């Protein structure tokens, strides 16, 4: 008899990942039937028209096919050739061989330098240890490694924001742990509330759950919120008080649109507070920001305030998969080590980066303002990241899943219902990206407006 669904573990059967769920499957069916679909369900920039950075793809091309260095040396700027030669020389065997489990050391050293420069205060560099940095297949693999390390039994719980990115709920379920949801405050722009954190901890203790860590996504997915330094300090104090590790998902750190807002890393604030007792796992990725290289699967995890014997266990977990893919490692190197002002590629690189980020900021504003003009829909300010998470008023007896499926069927707009991310009881939302070209963003607003006025 072939394998039956009854043979599968409950952990697998109960694992859900909303951004690629049944609504997306239906969208693909409709597309195969000839319908035009606008995919707003997932942060996949190049699938929605964002062009790759020229410098990045040129260097990667030379690394993938080193013969081009000899056969077509004049087809590429000098700094591109120099970067490719450096990468190939440091990697020793090129992109077709395994690296060490943590990832190529010169890449980890470049990441450590990037972190130190990013988090410097008044010109004083902050230290980062390359041996505590792991190259990962996108940030997701780093998150999964950290959660695998932390969840030891079915009584172990992880605090996750509500709403949250479904990677966390899905992975916690798959690893047999417990989700401890803490609500973000929608009325104050999805900020964190210490009271809500304490309430979540109190409920977990009542249920006999041992909280192991708190997840913070900054800038927020799906909310688009950007945390203040005071909010970050509060989370660090809370984690220390309850003996929690912090998982800082910081993949959108380049995506800041609100005037006056700025990204501050948890590593920076912890160093400023001289905090050495709270373990920190920080994640970054080449998939977001202005790179948008989702398919290359590049990313890293930095670990702080963890003893060497635990570092050895993380390395062991990383070794099971041998290493992160080499093109992704190169992408990560290029993300943290871009062209310098005197380099031939610098001007074009800055122009392309600025164009992408300014377009995203413009689309965020258009989407926020457009959604807020629609009766029954309210969207908090999109301060950062790549998403809007508006609340919607539903007719009695209707669900946000039904709303999003009907929206897809009638308009071809594919968004994800709020139930996939979590929301307060009695509320309904959907998540949409800001990534489609401006004309499509406007088409999405018009389609949602017309649908909202007649549905139900």
Image: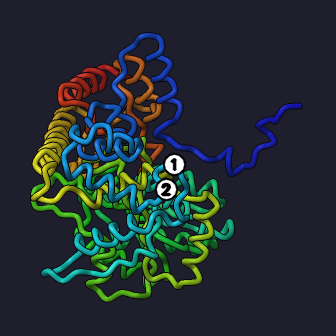
Looking at the picture, tell me which residue is in the foreground, 199 or 381: 381
Residue 139 % position (x, y): 44, 56
Looking at the picture, tell me which residue is in the foreground, 145 or 29: 145
Residue 183 % position (x, y): 40, 60
Q: Residues within 10 Å of mark 2 (few under 14, many from 20)?
A: few
What is the spatial separation of the Cα atoms under label 1 and label 2, in whole angstroms? 7 Å
Q: Residue at x 10, y 58 (%)?
A: 342
Residue 58 % position (x, y): 28, 42
Q: Residues within 10 Å of mark 1 (few under 14, many from 20)?
A: few
- In the current view of this chain or complex, which residue is farthest to the front? 70
The nearer-to-camera label among 1 and 2 is 2
The disc placed on residue 96 is 1
For residue 192, above or below residue 389: below
Reading the image, the residue beneath label 2 is 93
Q: Secondary structure at mark 2?
A: loop
Marks 1 and 2 in Cβ contact (< 8 Å): yes
Q: Secondary structure at mark 1?
A: helix
Looking at the picture, tell me which residue is in the foreground, 311 or 106: 106
């Amino acid at each position: 008899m072939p394998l039956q669904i009854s043979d599968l573990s409950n952990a697998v059967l109960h694992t859900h990942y909303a951004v690629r769920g049944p609504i997306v499957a239906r969208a693909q069916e409709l597309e195969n039937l000839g319908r035009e679909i606008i995919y707003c369900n997932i942060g996949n920039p190049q699938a929605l028209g964002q062009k790759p950075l020229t410098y990045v793809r040129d260097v990667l091309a030379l690394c993938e096919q080193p013969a081009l260095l000899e056969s077509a040396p004049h087809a590429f700027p000098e700094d591109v050739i120099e970067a490719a030669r450096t990468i190939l020389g440091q990697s020793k065997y090129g992109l077709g061989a395994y690296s060490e489990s943590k990832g190529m050391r010169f890449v980890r050293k470049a990441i450590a330098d990037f972190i130190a420069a990013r988090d410097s205060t008044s010109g004083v560099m902050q230290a980062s240890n390359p041996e505590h940095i792991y190259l990962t297949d996108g940030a997701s693999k780093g998150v999964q490694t950290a959660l695998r390390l932390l969840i030891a039994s079915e009584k172990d719980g992880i605090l996750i924001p509500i709403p949250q990115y479904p990677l966390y709920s899905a992975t916690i379920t798959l690893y047999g742990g417990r989700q401890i949801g803490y609500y973000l405050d929608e009325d104050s722009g999805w900020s964190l509330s210490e009271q809500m954190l304490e309430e979540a901890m109190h409920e977990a203790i009542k249920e006999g759950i041992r909280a192991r860590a708190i997840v913070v996504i900054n800038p927020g997915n799906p909310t688009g919120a950007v945390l203040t330094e005071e909010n970050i300090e509060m989370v660090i104090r809370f984690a220390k008080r309850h003996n929690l590790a912090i998982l800082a998902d910081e993949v959108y750190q380049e995506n800041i649109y609100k005037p006056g807002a700025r990204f501050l890393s948890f590593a920076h604030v912890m160093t400023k507070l001289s905090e050495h007792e709270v373990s920190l796992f920080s994640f970054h990725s080449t998939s977001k920001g202005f790179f948008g290289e989702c398919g290359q699967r590049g990313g890293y995890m930095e670990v702080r305030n963890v003893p060497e014997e635990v570092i050895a266990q993380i390395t062991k977990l990383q070794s099971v998969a041998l290493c992160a893919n080499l093109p992704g490692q190169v992408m990560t190197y290029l993300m943290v080590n871009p062209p310098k002002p005197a380099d031939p590629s610098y001007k074009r690189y800055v122009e392309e980066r600025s164009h992408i980020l300014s377009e995203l900021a413009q689309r965020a504003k258009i989407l926020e303002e457009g959604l807020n003009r629609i009766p029954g829909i309210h969207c908090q300010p999109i301060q950062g990241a790549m998403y809007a998470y508006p609340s919607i008023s539903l007719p009695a007896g209707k669900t946000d899943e039904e709303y999003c499926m009907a929206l897809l069927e009638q308009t071809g707009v594919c968004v994800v219902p709020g139930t996939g991310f979590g929301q307060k009881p009695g509320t309904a939302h959907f998540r949409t990206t800001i990534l489609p070209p401006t004309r499509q963003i406007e088409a999405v607003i018009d389609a949602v407006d017309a649908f909202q006025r007649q549905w139900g």
